Amino acid sequence: MAHAGCGCPGSMARVIERNDNEQATTVKQASELRQWPVQLHLVPPTAPWFQDSDILIAADCVAFALGSFHSDLLKGKALAIACPKLDDSTPYVEKLARIFAENDVKSITVAIMEVPCCRGLDMMVRQALAQSGKEIPLETAVIGINGERRN
């Protein structure tokens, strides 16, 4: 497998072939987004939507790869998005730890892509949860490049 110039196999250029007949639908899906902003750098740790909530922390690419992102992952959850590869993620662990510590969080779902560089987001969330001192149920959803859920 050839790697892109940056050395990360997740950055390798690919064409994803789709059968247009498989994707046909006439129903427009409503957005399940419940708050703004969504970027982890921008969300305040004490935002009201984190209180007594299920939280989804998703890698930026997940919503584009998983066609059913809103219904399968986002519905009923507060959202924060981040890219562990391209963002300055230095403050992420501390910010996530504050979110977990200062709110009554019911559960955390981390949604990442199958590429190796995306694992960093899962590791940051786990580190933040440990730092928060709380025990909150945590699930990781891994999404394939082709849009399928891997677990």
Image (cartoon, rainbow, N blue to C red):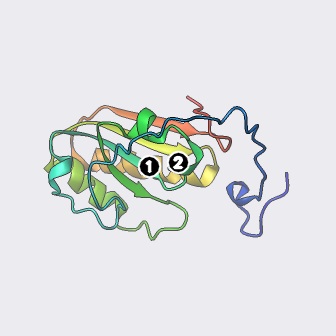
- Image coordinates for residue 145, horizontal then vertical, percent: 66, 44
Q: Is residue 130 above or below residue 140?
A: below
Distance from disc 2 to disc 1, alpha carbons, whole Å, reads 7 Å
- Image coordinates for residue 79, horizontal then vertical, percent: 33, 49
Position of 92 with respect to 112 (left or right) is: left
Instruction: Classify residue 77 by image quadrant.
Output: top left
Question: Are the residues at dot 2 and dot 1 in contact (C-beta closer than 8 Å)?
Answer: yes
Which residue was labeled with disc 1? Answer: 58
What element does badge 2 sit on?
Answer: helix
- Image coordinates for residue 62, horizontal then vertical, percent: 53, 48
Specify the farthest residue to the right.
1
Instruction: Residue at 55%, 53% (x, y): give it.
Output: 61
What element does badge 1 sit on?
Answer: strand
Disc sitting over residue 62 in the figure: 2
Indicate the quadrant containing the C terminus: top left, top right, bottom left or bottom right: top right
Amino acid marked by disc 1: Ala
Instruction: Classify residue 75 by image quadrant.
Output: top left
